Image: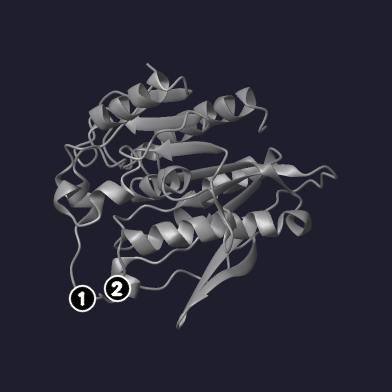
Amino acid sequence: MMFVLVSGLAAILAAVDVRADVPDNPNSLLGANSFIYKTVDDVTLRLHVFSGNTYQQTPRPAIIFFFGGGFRQGSIEQFVPHSRILSNLGMVAVVTDYRVLLRHGTTPAEAIEDGRDAIAWLRSQSVDLNIDPTRIVAAGGSAGGFLAAATAHIGDGLDPKRGWSAPNVLALFNPALGYPSSQWRRREGFEKQSPYLNLNDSSIPTFIAHGQADTVVPYSHAEKYCEKLQNLDGYCELHGYENAGHAFFNEGHHEGRYFKLTVAELIKFLAKFDYL
């Protein structure tokens, strides 16, 4: 089956008004070049670029991953295994930090701004990083999937101050997508931040891998998102996995079984659009 969606964003995006003792993300990662892409007050945000083990003279497609964690916490290391595989296949793969509630006292609105700034920064550095600025994939899992989709649908893709911040392709794993029946609907700003409600453009091909037994983000929400994109004459490819729950796709879950399956499907999708 091919198409995806979300329901219980309250569980994913539940917010409290205090910061917790959540460790900061590391400033560097083995095998990656690390860069500061944004500074806000006393917060320094970095992204980490995996360029693979082969040099290519022509500019390469890039994929930027946003970690999950309900906009409360989360680790940039979540998508390092994906990044290493894709960079060795010829892409530039990036994992990025962004502001979250329990580290920075922020909301999804600030995370979306960080995501857009990270993509714009990559484009601004495309020559130095050997990136093709017309072939950038935004990817992520759970709340990170919400964030990736939001960079495609929220705000103007071309901002005079920020630069071109919208991705060309989306790759999402059990993403929260802001479907209207989500419990998060009660949260202030839901309509402005919801990727589903702001989806009105068919130009961004979308890949989704989703567990059909997900009780955090219902599989039916992904289906509705894909239906809407397809009704706009866009391309949405949904891969549903029977008996798989939330976060099923991570390398450390299910002995890596779904990690291998979902990465294999992602590679096929990227090849279909000449990103690999």
* Inter-mark Cα distance, 2 to 1: 7 Å
Pick out the residue farthest to the right: 57
Q: Position of residue 98 (x, y in %)?
A: 44, 63
* Image quadrant assignment for residue 30: bottom right
Q: Nearer the viewer, residue 251 or 135?
A: 135
Pointer 1 residue: 18
Neighbourhood count class around disc 1 (C-alpha, 10 Å): few under 14, some 14–19, many 20 upward? few
* Image quadrant assignment for residue 200: top left
Q: Position of residue 37 (x, y in %)?
A: 58, 67
Residue at the spot 31% in from the left edge and 50% down from the top edge: 192
Q: In the image, is 221 to the left or to the right of 80?
A: left
Q: In the image, is 60 to the left or to the right of 8?
A: right
Q: In the image, is 117 to the left or to the right of 74?
A: right
Residue at the spot 57% in from the left edge and 38% down from the top edge: 168
Q: Quadrant of the N terminus?
A: top left
Circle 2: residue type: Gly
The answer to whether residue 19 is seen in the rendering is yes
Circle 1: residue type: Val
94 is higher (above) or lower (below) than 248: below
144 is higher (above) or lower (below) than 256: below
Pick out the residue farthest to the top: 1
Q: Nearer the viewer, residue 29 or 180?
A: 180
Secondary structure type for disc 2: loop
**C-beta proximity under 8 Å, tags 2 and 1:** yes
Pointer 2 residue: 105
